[in-house]
Amino acid sequence: MRPSRRLLGLALLAFAASLVAVASGGPMPAAALAPWLALAVLLAVDLALSLRRRLGVLAAAPAELFAGESGVVELTVDGAGPAEIAGRLDWPPGLDGPADAAFARDPLTGVAAARLTVHARRRGTWRLDRLWLNWPSRLRLLEFTPSVALDLTVAVVPSLRPMLSGSIDVAVRSQLFGAKENIVKGEGSEFHQLRDFTAGMDSRSIDWKRSARYRRLVAKEMRAERNHHVMLALDNGFLMREEIDGVAKIDHAVNAALATAWAAAVGGDLVGLFAFDSRPRHFLPPEPGRRAFARLRSRTAALGYETRETNHTLAMTHLLGRLQRRSLVVVFSDFVDTTTAELLVENVRLLGRRHVVVFVALRDPSLERLATVAPRSLDDVAAGVAAGEMRRERLIVMERLARLGIVVLDVEPAAVTARLVSTYLDLKAREVV
């Protein structure tokens, strides 16, 4: 409970009246105390009229939110509450929402409710444990500010939106069994089955030995090899903590990595995980099936937000020693200076000698806007020149990687999942691995 502005204003008036009474030379004690006594009586009446039983507050929040997406927290105060009521929530670091909650009272039920949109910024389990309420007294001389203990837990996890929508399943199954069936099954390197030769088939597919044995023309049907090893390498250094569109780069990378892992699981490949920062942290060997995807999701959800600088030399050397067969390695990383870029290029080049490497970097849209927007002041000119130089150096590094045979994806976060999945399907169809 605290005094309102109205009470402070009345106290100033009472103080002014007391000064006037003292300055007039009349019966000072009675005249000087009269305004304060009147204010005290008014305050006591206001307090007596405003006292009420403890309010009942109900709170509901989504148990789970995908990183980068939003949900709704609902707060409800029972019908015995005051006519005007407001609230304030203390948000944990991983959740972002409006600090003030505006309650609207239903005229039929008398229930005051507020709906707050919460945005999930960081992975983890976050608690909402306290709500601060605020309402004025009947005569608006006081403001009541009680706190209500809440027991809400919101788990922010990597996004599964592309998997739940079914878009990845459709894309992968179309690649394997849909309109591209002839490409995948007819021009692969893995033997699938024998079938009778019919008009229109490629004569080079005829198996002459078996045709002689069966005394009819028999052709080999091939298909693209499966059971490839796909390794998802996640850079979890401090550069990946930079936020783009309110979400850290590492979270954008994790979402795209999980979508690729799901596509690989549907396509019959084996998926593994490698996370690193200043040293290697997590290594999951490639495993088949959706059970492996569940393990991978659990590990990525537990990744912290590290403040260490990434050691690409140690990480790529460790990964090169752990991979026993030729694999598709998807490296999620980033750089800001030429020294980091030189080390990154050299170590990715060594990895690319034995494996197929896809390098994924997240482009910052704000940097692109700074480099292309028309300047209006000298500060805008300086910012545009700096942004243009950073973009030019970034393009040089990407071109060097591409010349080394590395598949480079330098895209904005909104498009990284679709581009990466389509790149994986293209490499799989062409049997590059």
Image: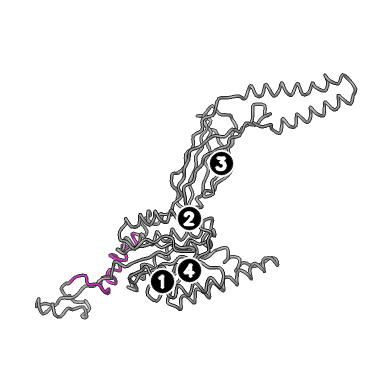
183 in the magenta segment: yes
Q: Nearer the viewer, residue 294 or 319?
A: 319
* Residue type indicated by callout 2: Gly
Residue at image mark 1: 357
Tell me which amino acid carries mark 4: His
Q: Residue at x 52, y 28 (%)?
A: 79
Q: Is residue 294 left or right of residue 122?
A: left
Position of the C terminus, as image quadrant, is bottom left
Closer to the camera: disc 2 or disc 1? 2
Query: Which residues are drawn in magenta?
Result: 169-193
As measured in the structure, the alpha-carbon distance from the residue carrying label 4 to the one carrying label 2 is 18 Å
In the picture as drawn, the residue positioned furthest to the right comes out as 25
Q: Of circles 1 and 4, which is in front?
A: 4
Q: Secondary structure at mark 2?
A: loop
Disc 3 designates what residue?
Answer: 89
Q: Residues within 10 Å of mark 3 (few under 14, many from 20)?
A: some
